[in-house]
Amino acid sequence: MRIAVGSTNAAKVAAVKEILADYPHLKDAEIVPLKTESGVADQPLSLKETIEGAINRAKSIFEGNDYSLGIESGLMEVPYTRGGYMDVCAAVIYDGSEFHIGLSSAWEFPDTRITTLMIEGGKNMSEAINEVGLTQNPDIGAAEGAIGIMTKGRVDRKEYTKQALRMALIHIDQHDIPSLRSGSKNF
């Protein structure tokens, strides 16, 4: 079995490998990281745009693979939060006919300047957190990510991505539950 990942980001690829190892019918799959574009803004500003980016990544790399995965993080509006937005990661598994979508937990920057830089200033998250001095790493998204900084290492980019992947796998990991099999294509 060959599963393509629409990213060469080390944290995302490691998350996919670790998650699939938890599933006996997927653990031996060949994981193929492929560079692809999301087709959405560098910093998605809505849940819809974030999911569309993950779908676009998965769909664009499906050919020649058994399954493909798209992973995209972005902001979404959330009422009652300080800055009005939270970050969320979307994972999409494409089986050639259906998209299976999962989301991570969502979180908010305590410093609203960062969100303002993304929403009003057109910066992506890495640029925004570098500008306010949270990090000097221009490629923080391939390392622990902003979530790693905010949680002081308790949750890093890989773990955050794994949450979304595990939720997407709910839709297709029901091969052993007969009442849930119909209408679902299994890995």
Image: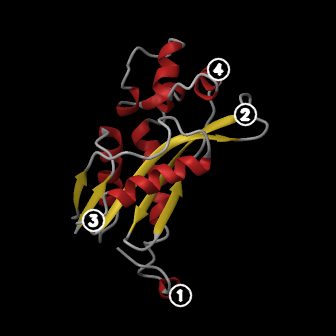
Query: Which type of secondary structure does the marked residue at label 3 adopt?
Result: loop
Label disc, if present, on residue 111 of the rendered structure: 4
For marks 3 and 4, the one nearer the N-term is 3
**Residue 136 falls in which quadrant of the image?**
top left
Indicate left or right for 19 with 63 as reference.
right
Three-letter amino acid code at disc 2? Answer: Gly
Query: Which type of secondary structure does the marked residue at label 2 adopt?
Result: loop
For marks 1 and 3, the one nearer the N-term is 3
Query: Which type of secondary structure does the marked residue at label 4 adopt?
Result: loop
Label disc, if present, on residue 41 of the rendered structure: none
Three-letter amino acid code at disc 4? Answer: Asp
For marks 4 and 2, the one nearer the N-term is 2
Question: Which residue in the protein does label 3 denote?
Answer: 63
**The N terminus, quarter of image:** bottom left
**Residue 8 falls in which quadrant of the image?**
top left
Q: Position of residue 133 (x, y in %)?
A: 50, 11
* Other-residue count near label 3 (Cα within 10 Å), few / some / many at <14 / 14–19 / ≥20: few
Residue at the image position 60 percent from the left and 51 percent from the top = 48
Q: Is residue 137 among what the camera can see?
A: yes
With respect to residue 26, does 165 lie above or below? above
Label disc, if present, on residue 84 of the rendered structure: 2
Question: Which residue in the protein does label 1 denote?
Answer: 179
For marks 1 and 4, the one nearer the N-term is 4
Of circles 1 and 4, the one toward us is 4
- What separation in Å lies between label 2 and label 3 (alpha carbons)? 39 Å
Q: Position of residue 101 (x, y in %)?
A: 51, 61
- What separation in Å lies between label 3 and label 4 (alpha carbons)? 42 Å
Pointer 1 with pointer 3, Cβ within 8 A: no
